[in-house]
């Protein structure tokens, strides 16, 4: 990129947001009480041990240089949350869809974001929420198919899940620490995470994003991989595509090499 810039932006649906509209759409995550987390969260290493997997000791060195779930048969294309602040529902349903397909050994099935928006009373519908409460709803109530409970892009809190003939189920919520993300991506699959979406971030259209992030976690996304690229190639099409953002995670300067290697996360945008 020119002048050391490694990403580009473009006009999109967020471009005309006032500061107030931006803050209303990208709302700070709801808080989750510690006792609730303790009851339902299963640490990653405990989950792996339960499945007779002994994780590599080195959190980075023993894993492949890159991992990318985009385009895999187990991951549906990203859906559009519209002008409803329901990222928490989309980032968890997308995760559920992947795991359901992986466990069943089938092509991915679309499940219902609208059900969670309407029925998860711990969350605030289009006014924000927290992925934990979304997963908690899955555990306690099951998840409807997308075709049986289609997305409307608004909340009326009139829960219609009694119409659903099939419910997908889950039994616990995985707890992944920031330094375990690469381990989780290699052993389990995509991970639902929170990011601090800033004005710069939401206008991203390509390259490797290294701009400012918001100070508070205000947007849920699906982490679908990681990779590395020489800075001079950061705009190469093979390192980006229309449905994802690449976020710089750390950089390594090889002495005497001006063209540093950029390590990045790949996240699914909604």
Image (cartoon, grey):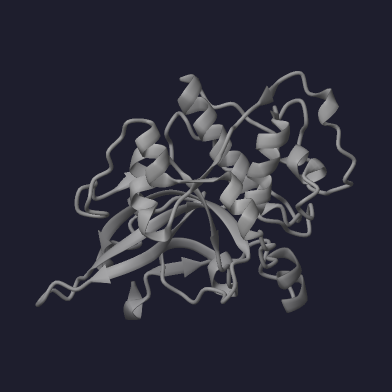
Q: Is residue 131 left or right of residue 261?
A: right
Q: Is residue 259 left or right of residue 84?
A: left
The residue sitting at 55% across, 53% down in the picture is 221
Residue 100 position in % (x across, y down): 54, 28
Q: Determine which quarter of the picture holds residue 78.
A: top right
137 lies above or below 177 = above
Query: Could you say which is closer to the camera, residue 6 or residue 163?
Result: 163
Q: Is residue 46 visible?
A: yes
The residue sitting at 19% across, 71% down in the picture is 259
Q: Is residue 80 visible?
A: no
Residue 236 position in % (x across, y down): 33, 57
Query: Could you say which is closer to the camera, residue 166 or residue 68?
Result: 166
Residue 8 position in % (x across, y down): 46, 68
Q: Is residue 248 left or right of residue 135?
A: left
Q: Determine which quarter of the picture holds residue 137.
A: top right
The residue sitting at 22% across, 53% down in the picture is 58
The residue sitting at 86% across, 32% down in the picture is 160
- Quadrant (top left, top right, bottom left, bottom right) of the N terminus: bottom left
How many badges with numbers are in the image? Answer: 0
Q: Residue furthest left?
A: 256
Residue 10 position in % (x across, y down): 55, 66
């Amino acid at each position: 990129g020119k002048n050391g810039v490694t990403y580009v932006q473009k006009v999109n649906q967020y471009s005309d947001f006032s500061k107030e509209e931006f803050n209303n759409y990208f709302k700070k995550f709801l808080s989750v009480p510690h006792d609730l987390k303790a009851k339902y969260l299963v640490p990653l290493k405990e989950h792996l041990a339960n499945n007779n997997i002994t994780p590599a000791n080195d959190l980075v060195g023993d894993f492949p240089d890159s991992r990318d779930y985009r385009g895999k048969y187990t991951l549906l294309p990203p859906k559009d949350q519209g002008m409803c602040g329901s990222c928490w529902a989309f980032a968890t349903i997308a995760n559920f869809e992947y795991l359901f397909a992986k466990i069943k050994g089938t092509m991915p099935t679309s499940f219902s974001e609208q059900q969670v928006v309407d029925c998860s009373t711990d969350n605030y519908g289009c006014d924000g929420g927290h992925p934990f409460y979304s997963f908690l709803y899955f555990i306690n109530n099951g998840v409807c198919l997308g075709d049986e409970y289609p997305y409307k892009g608004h909340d009326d809190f009139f829960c219609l899940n009694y119409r659903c003939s099939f419910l997908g189920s889950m039994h616990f919520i995985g707890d992944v620490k920031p330094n375990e993300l690469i381990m989780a991506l290699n052993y389990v699959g995509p991970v639902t995470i929170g990011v601090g979406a800033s004005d710069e971030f939401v206008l991203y259209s390509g390259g490797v994003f290294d701009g400012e992030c918001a100070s508070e976690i205000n947007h849920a996304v699906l982490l679908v991989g990681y990779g590395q690229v020489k800075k001079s190639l950061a705009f190469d099409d093979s390192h980006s595509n229309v449905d994802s953002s690449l976020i710089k995670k750390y950089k390594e300067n090889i002495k005497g090499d001006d063209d540093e290697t950029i390590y990045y996360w790949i996240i699914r945008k909604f």
